[in-house]
Amino acid sequence: MFTGTKIDEALYEELEAALLMADTGTQATAHLLDDLKRRVKAEKATEPTAVKRLLTEAIADLLRPLEKALPIGAQADGPTVLMVAGVNGAGKTTTIGKLTWHLSHAGATVLLAAADTFRAAAREQLGVWADRNTVDIVSQEGGDPAAVSFDAVSAGRARGKDVVIVDTAGRLPTQLHLMEELKKIKRVVQKADATAPHEVLLVIDGNTGQNALAQVKAFDQALGLTGLVVTKLDGTAKGGVLAAIAMWAREQQRSVPVYFIGVGEQLDDLQTFQAHEFAQALLA
């Protein structure tokens, strides 16, 4: 696409189709193409090869507000409490395991809360991650998710932990009774620590395209999201939906950063999100 002889409307039409295929969505695609045309004109670019660099810069600038480090240890009294949500199959519990590894290697002490009592074997799966990372876990067989969360935050404070990660049940935004349970977990956590949860993270599967944006909107409405983790970007996922999410956040005048992206199965394959690197990979 970038090896043609001239910059013309046909090139822009090809780019539009490619961006839409990469799940950027109509609004973000229109924004990026308008931005690209301004950059081409300002630089007086004549070679299509320059368009790739300019489009990379346009995408990176759109995504840059999503680039932020996960704040840990900002609380003067008690642990940083992370509440993690996501639909079944997004890789939520696996992401928590990798995040625990990441935080532990950064010197933080972590306690896990097995509050996903809805899915069979979820508690056992989180227990395996706790063993692999040699961290404490609070779990109850058949226990109430909110009660488990309360106990975990209280235990984290009593044991002097730096971070408490609450694993909640995977659910679809259309499962209203389960979304209400999520809200209850958040309320009960606040009873254990009035300032918690300090982060409400949504794990989204990079393969789900525009459906990921719908999930962000639904979970944000229910919980007030503070950040995202995007998984499975090592497969067929294009990841362009992050451009759509960036446009939504801009419209809402909200900060919903992407703290991490998952690019593989290994423990260290959870990487911090870098807007420019991501833009380069999107166009690679």
Image (cartoon, helix red, strand yellow):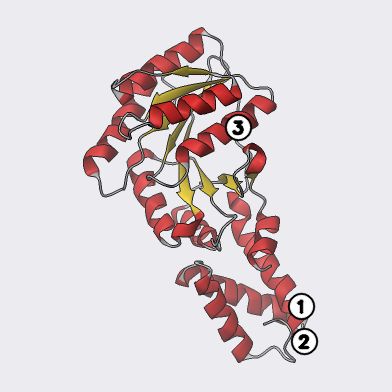
Q: Is residue 59 left or right of residue 94?
A: right
Q: Is residue 182 above or below residue 107?
A: below
Instruction: Report helix, strand or loop for mark 2.
Output: loop
Q: Position of residue 84 (x, y in %)?
A: 45, 35
Q: Earlier in the sequence, mark 3 or mark 1?
A: 1
Q: Which residue is mark 1?
A: 50
Disc 1 residue type? Answer: Ala
Q: Residue at x 47, y 68 (%)?
A: 25
Instruction: Judge the density around disc 2: few (<14), some (14-19), many (≥20) Cα neighbours within 10 Å.
Output: some
Would you call the spot at circle 3 few (<14 residues within 10 Å), some (14-19), or many (20 or more)?
few
Could you say which quadrant of the image residue 272 lies in? top right
78 sits to left or right of 212: right
In contact (CB < 8 Å): disc 2 and disc 1? yes
Residue 153 percent across, percent down from the top left: 44, 17
Foreground residue, 265 or 20? 265
As drawn, the label of residue 71 is 3
> Which quadrant of the figure has residue 192?
top left
> How much space separates mark 3 and mark 1, taking CA atoms?
37 Å
Q: Which mark is residue 46?
A: 2
Q: Is residue 165 visible?
A: no
Please tell me how crowded label 1 is: few (under 14), some (14-19), or many (20+) other residues with Cα within 10 Å.
Answer: some
Examine the rendering and report whether any part of residue 215 can be seen: yes
Q: Residue furthest left?
A: 177
Residue type at tag 2: Thr
Q: Real-space Cα distance between discs 3 and 2?
A: 44 Å
Rendered residue at 62%/73% (across/down): 35
Q: Position of residue 152 (x, y in %)?
A: 43, 17
What is the C-alpha distance between the residues marked 2 and 1? 8 Å
In terms of depth relative to the viewer, which is nearer, 183 or 147?
Answer: 147
Q: Specify the amino acid type for callout 3.
A: Pro
Q: Secondary structure at mark 1?
A: helix
